Amino acid sequence: MNKADADVSLLNQAESGLPQEDGQEVAYAAELAAFAEALAGGDTGALAAARAELDAVAGRAVTADAAAIAANFQCMTRVADATGIPLDTPMMAASQSVRDKLDFHQYASATNSKPIPRPLRPVARLLGKAIPVILKRVRLKL
Amino acid sequence: MRSETAPAFFLDDSPYPIREGVLEAYRELWQRFSEPGDSWTGAQRIAIAQESRDAKDCDLCVRRKQQLSPYGLNESHVLSDNGKLIGAAAVDCVHRIVTDPARLSRRMVEDARSSGLSDEQIVELIGITCVTMAIDEHYRALGLPLAPLPEPVPGPPRGRRIAEDRQEIGTAYVPMLARDSAVGDEADLWSGRRTAIHIIRALSLVPDALRDLTILSNEQYLTLEEAPAFALQPEGRAIDRLQMELLATRVSQVNECFY
């Protein structure tokens, strides 16, 4: 299993922090992950190939919107790391287990955030389970 | 001040169905970038945007990235005429942000300060660099040519500053607007909420830089109101929320962004 597979696998689990129905899967997950990876990796050839694959399986409307999201996170990651903001504590608590599994703590930018103290980790684990459930119930008042 | 003629940027002529709201946001951002900012002139702001493009082909940045340390090479960028408009320290910041995001550190900001850049100049620079990159990356991702940059609007920087007693210092490398200080002219910044998470506050020392980021993200990603609503499927999108978060996670992972 490569890292992209691992991401997709995690996103298919409730503990990813994303609320999901049982058995729900991410459509075109492998193609979307490859597309995002190629853009962020800056490999023009890989990007063209990933785009063609995504076009073929999902259609150009999906590719256009996927490109916008990936581009936005090319921006947001740089805003976060150029300004040196720490991760907000509730977000840290909600995503602790997935960060541990994907070994995000090895990143240089992890030093901007204080880890949750060991005694508080059980509370963080509970919060990590509760927050996605809460978020799932958030509805907009339109 | 606005140009008399609307710029013919981001026309709806792509083989990909880019949403009109996205194109409209890009046009608005190009217009905003062309005008004098709080700390840089319009010409300097467009020079920052151009430098974010030039960084992609920078030989020094390629060689730097191969070093064990991002400061392993004792070399400086050779400034183009464009680069001379903003100076060596600003060029160095822009290039590092674009080409080596995983190894950005406090040193970049401290070096910029030591070279005479103000915190406001640094924050405004980060905003223009990152937002320009987001627009360009959308087009690169689709294999489309980049839009030409707009002509700058003449005039001096506006010089607005957030008062020191409203700044939060020490949480990040740069000061931010304090959580309870989004009032008065800045009342819109947290979208009417009492506080905001750090990624929203990151550029808030220069409120217009945060407004630029909000204009961008509302269309490329989600609004502040939509973002926490994981059960919501935003209207008019061809991808669902899980697909959005998969893309976001993968890009963040490649860029080694802990946030």
Image (cartoon, helix red, strand yellow):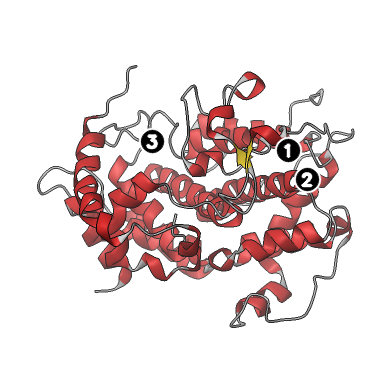
Q: Is residue B255 visible?
A: no
Chain identity of mark 3: B
User: Closer to the camera, B148 or B61?
Assistant: B61
Residue pointed to by mark 3: B227
Same chain, marks 2 and 1? yes
Q: Could you say whether the residue bearing mark 3 is in a helix, strand or loop? A: loop
Chain identity of mark 2: B
Circles 2, 1 touching at the beta carbon (< 8 Å)? yes
Measured in 3D between alpha carbons, the distance from the residue under mark 2 to the one under mark 1, in whole angstroms, is 6 Å
Q: Quadrant of the C terminus of chain B?
A: bottom left
Specify few, some or many for label 2: CA neighbours under 10 Å numbering under 14, 14-19, or 20 or more.
many
Specify few, some or many for label 1: CA neighbours under 10 Å numbering under 14, 14-19, or 20 or more.
many
Q: Could you say whether the residue bearing mark 1 is in a helix, strand or loop? A: helix
Residue B221, x across and y down, in percent: 45, 39
Q: Which residue shows up at 21% across the image and 30% down it?
A: A137
Q: Is residue B181 above or below residue B108?
A: above
User: Closer to the camera, B245 or B182?
Assistant: B182
Mark linked to residue B33:
1
Q: Could you say whether the residue bearing mark 2 is in a helix, strand or loop? A: helix
Measured in 3D between alpha carbons, the distance from the residue under mark 1 to the one under mark 3, in whole angstroms, is 26 Å
Give the foreground label among 1 and 3: 3
Residue pointed to by mark 2: B46
Chain identity of mark 1: B
Q: Is residue A84 left or right of residue A20?
A: right
Measured in 3D between alpha carbons, the distance from the residue under mark 3 to the one under mark 2, in whole angstroms, is 30 Å
Same chain, marks 1 and 3? yes
